[in-house]
Amino acid sequence: MIRSLLRPSPNPSHASSAARCLFAGASSHTSTTHERLRRGFHNSPAWHNQSQRSPSSKTVIRCDKYDKVMRKGYAVSSIEKKHSNRTVSQPVTGLETYDVEDWWEKWHPIARAETKPPCIFRKDAQGRSLYNPYTGSLVSWQIRETVEGFLARTKNVEKGFIRVANPYAPPRWKPAWETYSKAGEERLRMFTDFIKFYGYGNEADGKRDLGNIITERAEVMRNLTRLADACKLRAGKWLLYIPPDRVEEVWRKIATATVKNELGSEAGLRRGGMTSRPQLEGGLVKVYSRDFRDKAEAARLLEKLEKLGALDPNKEYYYKSDALSHLNLYAHNQWGLKTSLYTSTECWELLEAMNREQDVPV
């Protein structure tokens, strides 16, 4: 699969490294450990390797004063005795004396809470399912509150993004964030080596091979786009830089339309200028669609934003894959990569073509 996503580079070792990144195992899960704890096994090598011990050797177990663990089918409790400054555990009678539920509730309430899926599905008055991926977030709209209440609650948030999700949008795909990050970063490292190889020129004339660099630059973006699709990171977004005097007005319209299922899948606002681009004052609004591969959907979303009065007719707007932001890949990057997939000009032309096709009589 990696060969279909990543082109070979001058150094073949990089490709094998990228393959390892792409097929690296998902993040480790703790369910196995939790299950062992429920069954009454303590996570300690003292009895995991009992078969390797000599039958005559005396087993000394360190455990918490109030904790009880299992060994060879018997409950074990700690008895405090001075034995070379160690706590010696001795077996007590009966398996029933070990209460797993009590231990779990007292000592691992956080771990147990994480195993319970959050209650994020609700029904509206018409019986339609509501879904909010940001349930419980203090800087996000919640299903039980009104849009006006959300706006009033977050009006003083100056750092980071505040978000509102379309509650009628289908639940998201489960993306492979770790796989995409590892493989994407490896692909960028490969391109960095490629630029070093072709960019410094040869010893004879010192000329750089810009043709190969430009070709490879386009290939890198194709690779990252296909990789995002394979990892199910398919959300895309329009980036709107709003003047300071219009930020709150535009954000209120976008948030209201999103909650009413009249816009995209979600939207976000960050107030204040960008650290990297201080000349952009006001606020940055992101309006998302579910699938960046659907250019027509992105064009229709742009048309809805125009009807809301959120666009400046004299400005050009850009649509990009959300996955690139997780690689910290923005405009004016060190590789010279074009991070936008579509522009507002391209989408207006697409909408005009679609309207002409609809006007043609059958």
Image (spheres, rainbow, N blue to C red):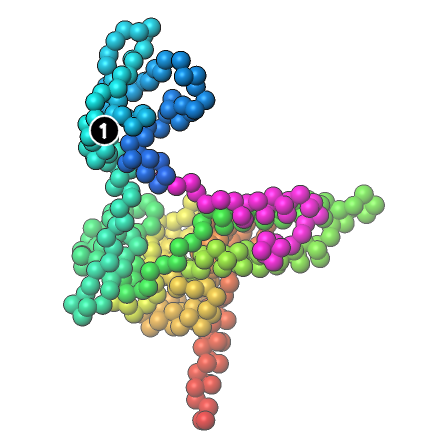
Image coordinates of residue 317 in percent, x first then y, are 45, 64
Which image quadrant is residue 57 in?
A: top left
Q: Quick one: which residue is furthest to the front in this view?
A: 55
Question: What span is colored magenta in the figure?
Answer: 1-30
Which image quadrant is residue 110 in?
A: top left
Image coordinates of residue 84 in percent, x first then y, are 33, 6
Looking at the image, residue 55 lies above or below residue 313: above
- Amino acid type at circle 1 is Leu
Q: Nearer the viewer, residue 72 or 274?
A: 72
Q: Nearer the viewer, residue 141 or 223?
A: 223
Question: Residue beneath label 1, please?
Answer: 95
Image coordinates of residue 10 in percent, x first then y, are 71, 48
Q: Nearer the viewer, residue 187 or 24?
A: 24
Category of crowding for the residue at label 1, using alpha-carbon neighbours closer than 10 angstroms: few (below 14), some (14–19), many (at least 20): few
Total labels: the figure holds 1
**Residue at left offset 61%, top offset 58%:** 4
Which image quadrant is residue 58 in?
A: top left
**Residue at left offset 32%, top offset 26%:** 72
Q: From the viewer's perspective, is 230 left or right of 104?
A: right
Q: Quick one: which residue is furthest to the left in this view?
A: 125
**Residue at left offset 40%, top offset 23%:** 50
Image coordinates of residue 212 in percent, x first then y, are 70, 55
Q: Is residue 17 magenta?
A: yes
Q: Is residue 19 magenta?
A: yes
